[in-house]
Image (tube, grey):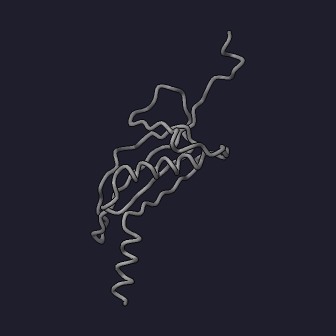
Amino acid sequence: MRFFLYILISVLLAGCTTGAATRVTSISYTPTEASSLQVFFEKPSRPYTVIGFVSAQGDAYVKEAAVFKKLKEEAAKIGADALLMRHDVTEEQDASGYQMKRGTGLALKWVDPPSNLQNR
């Protein structure tokens, strides 16, 4: 019975991703839709401000797409319009030998010019 329970818990935990977002501004933004976030691997040319740091990780069996999805979800929670990846999702091993996939990025908010300046 214990063996069955151990297998069941292992199966349920396998493939899970976790994530976190840390705001770096005192301004609270309305959450956005993760599906509409743009993802960049180089600094975008459009003016922006960094509103937070995001990270996500999963075990070695998780697909990179799941880590990207979690990064976007975390950035959207704090109101980001875009995600600037610090690097590709990497596979790492911690000191105990545990294999994991990890990704980090910056949550960006677009800075648009005031509407009264657009028609000048």
**Quadrant of the drawing holding the C terminus:** top right
Residue at the farthest bottom position: 1
Residue at the farthest top position: 120
Q: With respect to residue 111, does 22 lie above or below? A: below
Q: Nearer the viewer, residue 92 or 34?
A: 34
On the rendered structure, is 65 left or right of 109? left
On the rendered structure, is 56 left or right of 59? right
Residue 4 lies in what quarter of the image?
bottom left
Q: With respect to residue 48, does 72 lie above or below? A: below
Residue 119 lies in what quarter of the image?
top right
Percent x, y for residue 40?
42, 36
> Which residue is pictured at 31% across the width and 65% down the height?
94
Percent x, y for residue 64?
34, 51
Percent x, y for residue 42?
39, 33
**Quadrant of the drawing holding the N terminus:** bottom left
On the rendered structure, is 29 left or right of 56? right
> Which residue is pictured at 43% across the width and 60% down the height?
17
Q: With respect to residue 46, does 96 lie above or below? A: below
Q: Nearer the viewer, residue 60 or 87?
A: 60
> Which residue is pictured at 53% across the width and 47% down the height?
75
On the rendered structure, is 79 left or right of 42? right
Percent x, y for residue 97?
27, 69
